[in-house]
């Protein structure tokens, strides 16, 4: 795996203080020090900023991931266009700013891939909202037959529900009696990273279990063991290393983690306040009952 040469084209090394650009990430040779990397990752792939950086910067890795998620062979993926490229003009600290990947696949399908770490009570509703917005892709003057298929894929580093142990599941709009699809232009899929042990033979055949382990890897030793089994993950690993050793990209990822910490703190404060209000309401109700 360490001798992967798919990124061996010449490139230029960024100078200190220069704004990061994803164009400098992929076409360089394997980064110096990559083969000797060890220990903890500076940032895991579950960091949504790192997730976006790696897959926008490395089209080969993105092709491999899409192929695994949609069960497409490489020759079936003709073109991939990231329609919401990340910019580094400012560090985005707000976790409420969504860094998903919006993709036009083969020029005729709208694909939205989101890495989600925080367990949100409204995640199902939000994912449906994203799917509906992606489906609303007609331009003025287009006929309804021109609407592009829309696919929403959530990659979750939390369990969707206590009783939901499926590793990879896909949902369509179906007839409740016949289970016949109303349309194959709407699809919502969920990859639960913590349910790898429940991966099916089909999931493993498409290397979805390897992608899940790569996303959750915490050390370079883990990354190398996984990447040896899949050339697309090997490309992603090189790009991940390049981003981890570049202070400018690390700062961007750090900003996202600060946003997550702020969101978690605010959620805890809201929960504590709601609990305190519930306690006060109970005490007030008890006082009212005692006066009767």
Image (tube, helix red, strand yellow):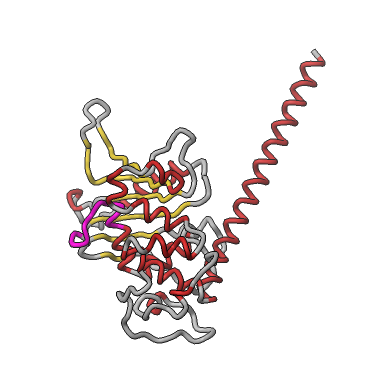
69 inside magenta stretch: yes
Q: Quadrant of residue 93?
A: bottom right
- In this view of the protein, can residue 92 be seen by the observer? no
Please give the name of the residue rendered at 33% of the width and 85% of the height, measured from the top-left corner: 10
Q: Quadrant of residue 77?
A: bottom left
**Which residue of the protein is positioned furthest toward the right in this rendering?**
291
- In this view of the protein, can residue 53 be seen by the observer? yes
Tally of marks: 0
Please give the name of the residue rendered at 62% of the width and 56% of the height, measured from the top-left corner: 262
Where is residue 129? Give x, y as percent: 39, 46
61 inside magenta stretch: no
Please give the name of the residue rendered at 18% of the width and 62% of the height, measured from the top-left corner: 75
Where is residue 23? Give x, y as percent: 38, 77
Where is residue 105? Give x, y as percent: 26, 60
For the C terminus, the image quarter is: top right
Where is residue 145? Give x, y as percent: 17, 49
First to last magenta residue range: 66-76
Please give the name of the residue rendered at 58% of the width and 59% of the height, measured from the top-left corner: 259
**What kind of secondary structure does the magenta stretch mostly adopt?**
helix
In the image, 110: left or right of 158?
left
Q: Is residue 110 above or below residue 32?
A: above
């Amino acid at each position: 795996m360490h001798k992967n040469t798919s990124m061996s084209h010449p490139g230029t090394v960024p100078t200190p203080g220069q704004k990061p650009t994803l164009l400098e990430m992929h076409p360089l040779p394997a980064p110096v020090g990559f083969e000797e990397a060890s220990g903890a990752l500076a940032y895991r792939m579950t960091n949504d900023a790192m997730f976006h950086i790696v897959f926008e910067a490395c089209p080969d890795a993105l092709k491999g991931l899409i192929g695994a998620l949609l069960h497409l062979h490489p020759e079936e993926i003709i073109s991939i266009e990231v329609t919401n490229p990340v910019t580094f003009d400012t560090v985005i600290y707000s976790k409420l700013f969504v860094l998903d990947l919006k993709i036009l696949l083969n020029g005729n399908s709208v694909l939205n891939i989101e890495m989600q770490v925080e367990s949100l009570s409204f995640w199902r509703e939000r994912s449906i909202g994203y799917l509906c917005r992606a489906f609303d892709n007609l331009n003025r003057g287009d006929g309804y037959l021109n609407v592009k298929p829309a696919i929403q894929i959530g990659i979750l580093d939390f369990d969707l529900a206590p009783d939901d142990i499926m590793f990879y599941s896909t949902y369509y709009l179906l007839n409740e009696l016949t289970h016949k699809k109303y349309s194959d232009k709407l699809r919502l899929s969920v990859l639960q990273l913590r349910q790898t042990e429940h991966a099916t033979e089909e999931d493993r055949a498409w290397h979805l279990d390897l992608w899940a382990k790569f996303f959750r890897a915490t050390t370079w030793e883990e990354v190398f063991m996984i990447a040896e089994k899949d050339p697309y993950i090997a490309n992603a690993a090189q790009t991940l290393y390049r981003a981890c050793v570049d202070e400018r990209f690390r700062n961007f990822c750090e900003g996202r983690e600060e946003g997550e910490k702020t969101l978690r703190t605010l959620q805890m404060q809201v929960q504590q306040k709601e609990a305190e209000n519930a306690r006060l309401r109970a005490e007030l109700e008890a006082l009212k009952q005692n006066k009767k």
